[in-house]
Image (cartoon, coloured by chain):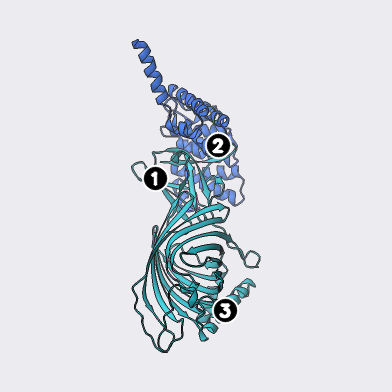
Chain colours: A blue, B cyan
Amino acid sequence: LALALGLALGLAQRVGAQDARLTQRLDAMTAHAVSAIVDSARAAGLPSEPLVQKALEGASKRASGEQIASAVRRLHARLAAARSALGAGAAEAELVAAAAVLDLGASADGLRDLREPKIDRSLAGPLVGLAYLIQRGVAPDASLEIVRSMLRAKLSDTEFVALQRLVDQDIRAGAPAADAASMRARALIQHGPGLRTRGGGRS
Amino acid sequence: MRARVTLVRTLALAVSIAWSDGLGAQTTVPDPRGRWRSSIADLLSRRATLSVMPGVGLVTGSPTRTGVGATIAWTSDADAGVAASIALGLMGARIGNRGFTRSGIDGRLEWRGDGVRAWIGAGAAAAAGAGPGNVFSMELGGRAGGLRLDIRTSWLRGDSVSYRDTLTSPVPRSAGGLPGNARYTDAEITAARAFGRVAAQAVFGARFGESGDVFGNAVTPQRQPPDRWASANITVPVRGRVALVAGGGWQPERREIAQRGGAFTSVSLRFDLRDTRAASNVIPPQPVTPSMLSAEPIGDRRYRLRIVIEAQRSVELQGDLTDWRPVALRPAGSQENLWEISVASGPGVYHVNLRVDGGDWIVPAGLPRVPDGFGGSAGLLTLK
């Protein structure tokens, strides 16, 4: 009897633990499917909130239940691959950014190389910068090399944001994305924060 | 009569300046009068905003009022400092079986500070039908946050009594003055707030210092208890640049626009059009380049998001920060086209989209664009 009660309580807790946002915004079947993926992520030690948010994004964008479940499942796989590449200690922000980078076509091996033992800092900012370069048309391998060299030069998140602004400015002026990215990254590595204030503070 | 002539000359001047600027013939003129003219031409060469507003209103115990109004306005740029604006307005209305038409010009100088604005302006209009023949007005105003104060004095000059029957109260008559001449000062406080895509306004007002003929030979104040009124309206975007404006409450009698006083309800459509001078050969103004969506911490797990983006009515954000529900940004006030919002969240990387004037959801400028898994894109925003 005690075992049955325990099982029933456990089941009730699991049902009760289903995120209310999912049940409010999704149909019952989709909410159930997404909750199962969220539970699986929790069990694997992956962050669950990005998965809930992906489902809410789908609901907001009027995607079908099937599309929502598929997108959440895909993100779950990306988060798992990102953690595998960055290590078990990777923070949620790093995993979210890395999953986006993987979605843009970067390789998991390339991400793995970013986590060098001597680089002791959050990779969230550099990964967002990496996503920006790839999305602007710089090849994933070239983008990874640029970010890796900036990390080795111990540039801060501020310099990664500055790189985005400067590259954007150059592309608007007609420069090829790859040339702009490599030239601006080289300049930032050589001159550091000074270039940001001279060249792209308000661009 | 002299007032009407003056008004016609003012309108003619405005039109001629617009033409000369459009032909590119305006050059630097050394004398002060030339500099003034050059400034006006520079103002008129800027992007104009045309607003057209047809509508219908019901006032208790009065005939239905239908009408249409159109305003074209030019405003100079000023992040902080003094900005000038000129507006030309046309309106036509029908109150029962009586008609009313009005055309006018308004000018305004506005000081813009950090979150605060103050202005002074003047206007003149000529009208025919169920209202006074000429109207001159002066205004003072200010705005801070969602609150706005307007104080407006109107001088009315009528050369007929034809409109008296249309209005609720008899037009003041003074010894030696012409029937229909009058002056009054209105003060209004407007509170505005946006609820998602819907903008709401509440207006509270009072009238002071109403008097009879001020243009005539004798000024005979006819002290009356100040009128007071209150009303509310909401603006709901319908599609594109079309919005539905619905309101109700109590409104003052405003003879300058042949508006009867009393309880009222109204429904109108608003059309906002831009670049009305695109067909002319004026160099088109440069569009506002959207800035990168920036985030700065303003407290424990609170950030202020800011973006410079051109919008007529609304800028909204949705994303991981808002459980993917739209939240409205508010104009920062300190800088034109600067919109901001504060959000409660911890540091992290978040997916977001932005919507301007009820259009499509877009990726904010400057953020990495990533596929959203639903056939669209989202931006990656970093909070540190």
Residue pictured at 42% horizontal, 31% vertical = A20
Three-letter residue code for mark 1: Tyr
Q: On the rendered structure, is A12 left or right of B245? A: left
**Could you say which is closer to the camera, residue A203 or residue B278?**
B278
Which is nearer the N-term, disc 1 or disc 2?
Answer: 1
Q: Where is residue B99 in the image (x, y as percent from the top left)?
A: 56, 73
Q: On the rendered structure, is A105 left or right of B110? A: right
- For marks 2 and 3, give the CA distance: 55 Å
Q: Is mark 1 on a helix, strand or loop?
A: strand
Q: Which residue is labeled 1 in the image?
A: B303
Q: Where is residue B119 in the image (x, y as percent from the top left)?
A: 42, 69
**Could you say which is closer to the camera, residue B359 or residue A112?**
B359
**Could you say which is closer to the camera, residue B242 or residue A70?**
B242
In this rendering, is residue A164 above or below B77? above
- For marks 3 and 1, give the CA distance: 50 Å
- Residue B313 visible to an observer of this rendering: yes
Q: What element carries label 3?
A: helix
Q: Which residue is labeled 3 in the image?
A: B13
Three-letter residue code for mark 3: Leu
Q: Where is residue B178 in the image (x, y as percent from the top left)?
A: 46, 86
Q: Is mark 2 on a helix, strand or loop?
A: loop
Q: Which chain carries label 3?
A: B
Q: Which residue is labeled 2 in the image?
A: B372
Q: Mark 1 lies on which chain?
A: B
